[in-house]
Amino acid sequence: MTSKERVFRAIRRDPRRMPDRVPVQFDLCRALTEHFAGELGMKAQYALSYYEDLTYRISANDIRTRMGSDCIVVGGTVARGYAPRPVAAGADARPVAQGAGSAAPGAAAAVTENEFGMHMKPTSLYVEVVKCPLETASAVEDVRRYAFPDACTPGRMDAAKRDIDRFGSEYFVIGDVELSLFELAWHLTGLEKYLMALISEEEWVGLLNDRVQEWTMGLCRQLVSAGVDALWFGEDLGSQTSTLISPDMWRSFFKPRYKAMFDELRGLSKDLVIIMHSDGAVAPLLDDFIELGVDVYNPVQPNVPGSDPRELKTKYGSRISFFGGIDQQGLLPAGDVARIREEIEIRIGILGEGGGYLLAPAHIIQADVRPETVTEMIRAAKDFGEYR
């Protein structure tokens, strides 16, 4: 059974056509990517995303498949020939060899400006937006004047098409369009400003949402045309304790937009798998995701309200599949192999019952996780994941 067939069978939850085992996917930060590249005698290939923190989702597919991933992840990169523009060195600039930023290992943590005009600063784990291009917007004209990057610019899909051509016949291909609506919009303005404008229903925020949706659909159409099996939409709508905005507010401002997007995309590819990603406590939105036709919920973040695997499987398991579920906040960094194996066996036994589960950490694996722990995680997934 190919990895592609394994993932499709798992997601479809057909008891007559079960996969041979629970499929596996994982993302690695730069430090871990470099480690495993050296261990495998390979050279890591990086695809610089239009939003820097997505770079490691769409890079090093050759390394991850060699390690045991059943999926590859592709997405839009910066325009051909584009490089982020340095804007400041920063008083606390420091090496970011352990980080998830776009700087090379050992490089200074310079602040750069990306295609959106966001000023981006690498930290020890992530790249943070430190200046937003629309932070002073107050009128429709401000949003109208703002120059969005061209989603269809030459080079945007070069890396995606290369990896689809290389791996697409054997591996399940996920097209990443994270920062899809809510999250991209507030990264352009700043969170507090955006939320206040949304609550006040200021006219300019409606136009901003329209333009963000247009950008995202530009990426989606190209990825579908390139041949992805799934699109991975990303909105971090939850905190550790609740949703960031009320469910009713999400239903009012964003659910109709997703319906329009999904309707168009399903018209382009009837077999397209829709994955909805949101960190945090977003269980109150799962019925809405299902109503919209979302096939897969990711990352099933542990240790937040509404994330009990048995409750999720019992309530939703016949209507949606699960992707993620392995704790990378505490479990993987602690590196206790016996506990990791026990947790993976439990998750597979519950979420994988009857299919419907793609095992993965609930986030990109960061540099606070030892390489040998990653190896043990993959081994455990395959030891306990076989359907008998």
Image (cartoon, helix red, strand yellow):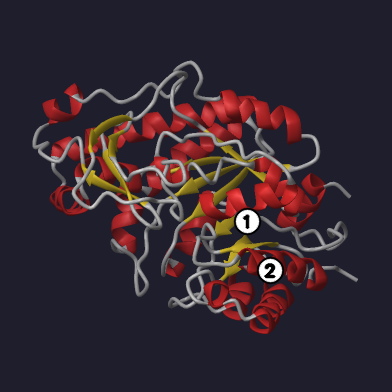
In percent of width and height, residue 287 lies at 49, 63
**Structural distance between the alpha carbons of marks 2 and 1:** 10 Å
In percent of width and height, residue 379 lies at 76, 67
Residue 70 seen in the current view:
no
Q: Amino acid at mark 1?
A: Phe
92 or 217: nearer the viewer: 92
Residue 281 seen in the current view:
yes
Left or right of 336 in this view: 328: left
Q: Residue at x 10, y 38 (%)?
A: 136
Seen as rendered, the residue at the extreme top is: 154
| Label annotation for residue 377 | 2
Query: Which quarter of the figure is the C terminus placed in?
Result: bottom right
134 or 311: nearer the viewer: 134
**Based on the displayed image, in which of its 4 quarters is residue 222 positioned?**
top right
- Identify residue for label 1: 26
Mark 2–mark 1 CB contact (< 8 Å): yes
Of mark 2 and mark 1, the one earlier in the sequence is: 1
Q: Relative to 157, is 184 above or below?
A: below
Q: Residue at x 62, y 42 (%)?
A: 60
75 or 286: nearer the viewer: 75
12 or 375: nearer the viewer: 375
In percent of width and height, residue 151 lies at 42, 24
Left or right of 304 in this view: 200: left
Q: Residue at x 52, y 49 (%)?
A: 30
The residue tagged with tag 2: helix, strand or loop?
helix
Q: Relative to 150, is 11 above or below?
A: below
Q: Relative to 297, is 129 above or below?
A: above
